């Protein structure tokens, strides 16, 4: 029997663990969402003429975030979750303040890439969750984490907008550093090591290769990771273009933070609802129904936009429903991808995090580059991502949806 089937002895309570996990993950989102209102101002200040280049401030960060996950997760399987998290958050603070000093657009992109590399260390939180929980209970923890985590997109754009009223855009990066520093102190004081001593992996090429092979050869883990990747592509496209949508499509940029927050609130409500029912209803029934709804809503949104009927209220309604179903899909898909590979959770989190973030950023960037002054590319790209995610889910489930899951032995235990 796996040690990770039940919570390990720890000095931190369940609620505090969820809150700390969410706060650690929120450092990733804060670095993106707080600056959304500032993208046009940053481009103007750094003498960049093309408004589409604002997306590169997001994409450079996301690229660093994706590559960094390949490193931090594997290191955590050797040196433990706590040490790696503290190291990564410390580097995050340094990178955030270096962004405040960037003298031109190119240097800002460089430091944003480094910022993303450091923020990638927070992927280790997923390994810590898997160390302590499994199955539907793990899905509940991840859903509750997502509820707290989603508060950042709700308030971050408004915080960024407020900072711009009283200070230069560089102070937004300083805020990121201060927040991450506070989380690092909390983590240092309260979080014990969650990795069981017998699961510490020797970092030889053979051990890492074996762990990677086990992760990639697991059908459930692989295809649910690809499904998460496609869903994140749709999310990144939305985050990268939402500022342009409100500026160029609706000519109401001041409404962007509040409308963005509304979408995020529905994501949080959906995640909380998932945490309440997932242990009874099951991850597959919830996430498969949500994915079908996601596709339907995106297709309807694309039809409305293509017919020239898009207005602010239709965009907000469709995008809110899309993000709510996204929340139900991703929190469960992520848990199902991690479930079969708990004994090499660090390697698994690294590979899954890299794949979903890097290729999700590429997909989102491609959709974003198609922006033509309407919401058609975003809606159409979202629908395509959902349809391809459905193909991946069918591949993971041998062509069946809603089927109850029969747990199988973790193949990674062969390493130990």
Image (cartoon, rainbow, N blue to C red):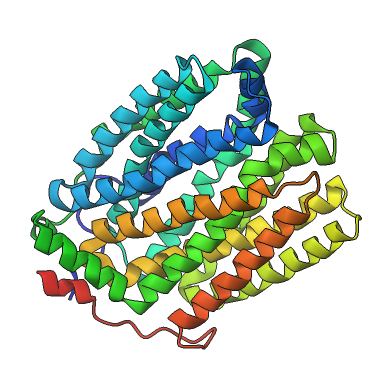
* Image location (x, y in percent) of residue 17: 35, 47
* Image location (x, y in percent) of residue 56: 55, 36
Q: Quadrant of residue 38?
A: top right
Placement of 56 over or under 170, stated as above or below: below
* Image location (x, y in percent) of residue 116: 41, 37
Residue 177 shows in the view: yes
**Residue at image coords 64%, 56%:** 323
Q: Quadrant of the C terminus?
A: bottom left
Residue closest to the eye, 275 or 365: 365
Residue closest to the eye, 124 or 377: 377
* Image location (x, y in percent) of residue 192: 21, 43
Q: Quadrant of the N terminus?
A: bottom left
Residue 282 shows in the view: no
Tell whether 281 sits left or right of 371: left
**Residue at image coords 68%, 15%:** 165
Placement of 131 over or under 400, stated as above or below: above
**Residue at image coords 37%, 25%:** 95
**Residue at image coords 46%, 27%:** 176
Tell whether 376 sits left or right of 343: right
Q: Number of labelled discs?
A: 0
């Amino acid at each position: 029997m796996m040690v990770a089937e039940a919570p390990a002895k720890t000095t931190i309570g369940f609620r505090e663990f969820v809150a700390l996990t969410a706060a650690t993950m929120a450092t990733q989102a804060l670095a993106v969402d707080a600056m959304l209102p500032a993208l046009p101002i940053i481009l103007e200040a750094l003498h960049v003429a093309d408004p589409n280049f604002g997306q590169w401030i997001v994409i450079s960060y996301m690229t660093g975030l994706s590559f960094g996950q390949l490193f931090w997760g594997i290191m955590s399987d050797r040196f433990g979750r706590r040490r790696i998290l503290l190291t990564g958050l410390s580097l995050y603070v340094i990178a955030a303040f270096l962004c405040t000093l960037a003298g031109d657009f190119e240097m800002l992109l460089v430091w944003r890439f480094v910022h993303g590399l450091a923020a990638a260390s927070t992927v280790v939180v997923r390994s810590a969750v898997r160390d302590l929980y499994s199955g539907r209970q793990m899905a509940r923890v991840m859903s509750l984490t997502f509820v707290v985590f989603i508060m950042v997109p709700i308030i971050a754009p408004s915080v960024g907008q407020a900072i711009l009223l009283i200070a230069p855009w560089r102070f937004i990066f300083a805020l990121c550093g201060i927040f991450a520093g506070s989380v690092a102190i909390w983590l240092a004081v309260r979080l014990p090591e969650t990795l069981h001593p017998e699961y510490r992996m020797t970092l030889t090429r053979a051990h890492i290769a074996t762990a990677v092979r086990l992760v990639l050869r697991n059908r459930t883990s692989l295809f649910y990771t690809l499904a998460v990747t496609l869903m994140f592509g749709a999310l990144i496209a939305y985050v990268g273009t939402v500022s342009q949508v409100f500026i160029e499509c609706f000519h109401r940029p001041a409404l962007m933070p509040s409308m963005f927050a509304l979408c995020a609130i529905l994501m949080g409500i959906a995640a909380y609802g998932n945490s309440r029912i997932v242990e009874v209803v099951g991850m597959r029934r919830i996430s498969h129904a949500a994915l079908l709804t996601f596709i339907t809503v995106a297709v309807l949104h694309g039809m409305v936009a293509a017919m020239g009927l898009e207005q602010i209220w239709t965009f907000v309604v469709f995008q809110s429903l899309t993000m709510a179903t996204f929340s139900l899909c991703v929190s469960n898909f992520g848990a199902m991808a991690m479930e079969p590979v708990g004994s090499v959770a660090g390697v698994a989190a690294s590979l899954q995090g890299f794949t979903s973030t890097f290729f999700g950023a590429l997909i989102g960037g491609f959709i974003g580059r198609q922006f033509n002054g309407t919401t058609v590319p975003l809606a159409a790209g979202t629908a395509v991502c959902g349809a391809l995610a459905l193909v991946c889910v069918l591949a993971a489930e041998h062509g069946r949806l809603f089927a109850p899951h029969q747990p199988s032995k973790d193949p990674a235990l062969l390493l130990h």
